[in-house]
Image (cartoon, rainbow, N blue to C red):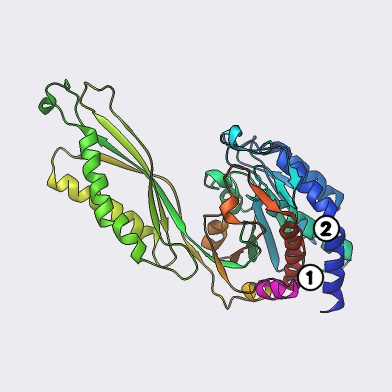
Amino acid sequence: MDKEIALIINQAEALREETVEFLAELVRAPSQHSPGDTRLTAEICRRKLGSLGLTAEVVGEQEHAPSLIARLNPGGRPELVFNSHLDTVGLGEKEQWKYPPLGAVIENGRLYGRGAVDAKGCVAAMIMAAKALALAGLKLHGSLVLNPVAEEEVGGYKGAGYLLQEGFLKPDLAVIGESTANRVAVAEKGMYWFKVVAFGRTAHGSTPWHGINAIEKMLKFLSRLDQQVAGKLMARTHPLTPPPSLNIGMIQGGVNTNVVADRCEVKIDRRIIPTESLAQAKREIACILEELAEQDRDFRYELTTLAEGNPIETNPDEPLVKLAQEACAISGLSQELSGYQQVSDGRFFNDAGIPTIIMGPGQAMEAHTPNESIDINDLCEAVKLYAILAWQALR
């Protein structure tokens, strides 16, 4: 181990207590959807970045959902972005929580609270990694961009997507902070969220043949969907991700028990592995609907895309991947590559042609659950891991 990395590790370890306090402050700040108001969490991060001598630019398409951009050694190249998100999902049923969901209670080496693992732990570790680098006093040739964002939990279009589209971010490399147990993830499923509306014609429930039942039409679609898509997904595999999936998340239709339903709506979540494509997934759905309309003149429908994102697969030989594996080795962590179980803002960077990995503390299965928590040792290991990676990529 060279003396620079030893110095970085020493600085990171000295920041353990401050790291935990910083995460606790973030967890106590509400930022859940809806509405996903990240103003308080962004201000906490802005103050922390300011204590490092960094000026954070506050940017956002929506006033209530700001994101931050701060640069260590601005103007240097390459530019490495550390991106993670400040918004969280809702609290759920508070009765299911052992501790207050915004309490940041620490017990048995874990910090409990909404966002602890998804993804305020990553945000805290990334910013504290920048502090470890700054305190080490090492000269960087490249620039480290700290980028806590809003809106990830609702698709990311007005968060990371907006920042890239509008040119606020133009990095050469991207590390996305999400819970991977501090392993290097190079693959991630894509998503296609869509809505189908089936239309019918009302009639009295005692003479349904005078109407067209939209719910019955929807059942035909869902049956065909199960046979032609859902039933085949488990046979499609990727070595680093869970199988592709299809979830019927919401369905509603009809006006009363004794009325033939003239409208039925369903919302579906289709997850796409890297060996599939978004276009392929969309075409599978469209073909079923087109076939039904050809076979049944009373089958009228509307198909709407709610959200979409391409899957990610970064080449294991990419220099960023190798540097991250080396940082894991130095930190005594596994170098084995993994896939990320959910969907992240990484797709926006990947779609822009930027080499992208997903990496962060915590277990993905903790996300969105009652009693969400993060292991404090994992959190502090991530500070070292991020700082070592940044130094290797930017020195």
Secondary structure under badge 2?
Answer: helix
Q: Position of residue 66 (x, y in %)?
A: 66, 41
Q: Quadrant of residue 232?
A: bottom left
Q: Which of 214 and 348 is in front in this view?
A: 214
Q: Position of residue 53 (x, y in %)?
A: 86, 52
Q: Is disc 1 surrounded by few (<14), some (14 to 19) or many (20+) residues within 10 Å?
A: some
Secondary structure under badge 1?
Answer: loop
User: Does residue 262 show up magenta in the picture?
Assistant: no
Image disc number at residue 43: none
Amino acid type of disc 1? His
Q: Is residue 79 visible?
A: yes
Q: Which of 41 and 92 is in front in this view?
A: 92
Left or right: where 276 falls relative to 96 = left
Residue 326 versus residue 245 in the image, above or below: below
Seen at 66% across and 60% down, the residue is: 360
Which residue is denoted by mark 2 in the rendering? 131
Q: Quadrant of residue 262?
A: top left
Seen at 35% across and 57% down, the residue is: 281
Residue 16 versus residue 391 in the image, above or below: above
Q: Main secondary structure of the magenta part?
A: helix
Q: Which image quarter is the C terminus in?
A: bottom right
Magenta stretch? 324-334
Seen at 63% across and 66% down, the residue is: 183
Which residue is denoted by mark 1 in the rendering? 141
